[in-house]
Image (cartoon, rainbow, N blue to C red):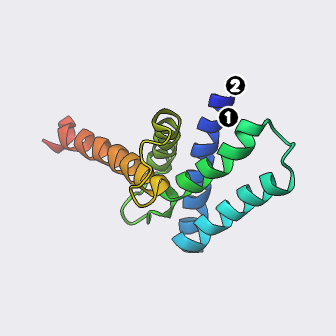
């Protein structure tokens, strides 16, 4: 159950930041910061809300996935790309553990890997579709 909650938290962090950034025009940095402060503050002030594992990991996942939501809608036009990248971010977070320690920001590194992966798959899919040939 903890894994499912972390996966949902990643999708939520990415999509909510993308919405605040592009639909409400707050800008990427402010949108990401707002989501991170809300998530971090919620679990800081209410640590008994969920179990200790989730209390520690959910704010990190939401903040890391919010980096994906900082993308502009001039480049990424569809919400599903951001949602899937948040999901991939969460999976990377769960699987890598401390592998990215020392890479100058493990959350940002995982966010970059996840958004590039989903964007590339969408780009290749569009290039290979029969309508583009």
Q: Residue 25: in sight, yes or no?
A: no
Q: Nearer the viewer, residue 25 or 118?
A: 118
- Quarter that holds the N terminus: top right
Q: Residue at x 85, y 42 (%)?
A: 49
Residue identified by numbered label 2: 1
The foreground one among 110 and 118 is: 110
Place of residue 89 in the rendered image (x, y in percent of width and height, measured from the top left)? 48, 44
Residue beneath disc 1: 5
Left or right: where 83 falls relative to 77:
right
What residue is rendered at 26% in x and 47% in y?
A: 123
Q: Mark 1, residues whose alpha carbon is within 10 Å: few (<14), some, or many (≥20)?
A: few
Up the image or down, 101 lies above or below 92; here it is below
Residue for point 45% across, 37% down: 96
Whether label 1 touches label 2, CB < 8 Å: yes
The residue furthest front is 102
**Is label 2 in a helix, a strand or a loop?**
loop
Spatial separation of the CA atoms under disc 1 and disc 2: 6 Å
Q: Nearer the viewer, residue 55 or 131?
A: 55
């Amino acid at each position: 159950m903890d894994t499912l909650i972390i996966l949902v938290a990643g999708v939520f962090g990415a999509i909510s930041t993308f919405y605040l950034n592009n639909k409400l025009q707050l800008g990427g940095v402010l949108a990401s910061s707002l989501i991170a402060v809300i998530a971090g503050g919620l679990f800081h002030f209410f640590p008994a809300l969920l179990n200790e594992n989730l209390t520690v990991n959910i704010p990190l996942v939401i903040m890391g996935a919010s980096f994906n939501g900082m993308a502009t809608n001039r480049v990424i036009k569809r919400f599903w790309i951001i949602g899937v990248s948040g999901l991939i971010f969460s999976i990377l977070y769960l699987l890598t553990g401390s592998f990215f320690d020392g890479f100058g920001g493990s959350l940002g590194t995982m966010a970059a890997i996840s958004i590039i992966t989903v964007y590339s798959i969408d780009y290749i899919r569009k290039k290979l579709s029969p309508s583009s040939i």
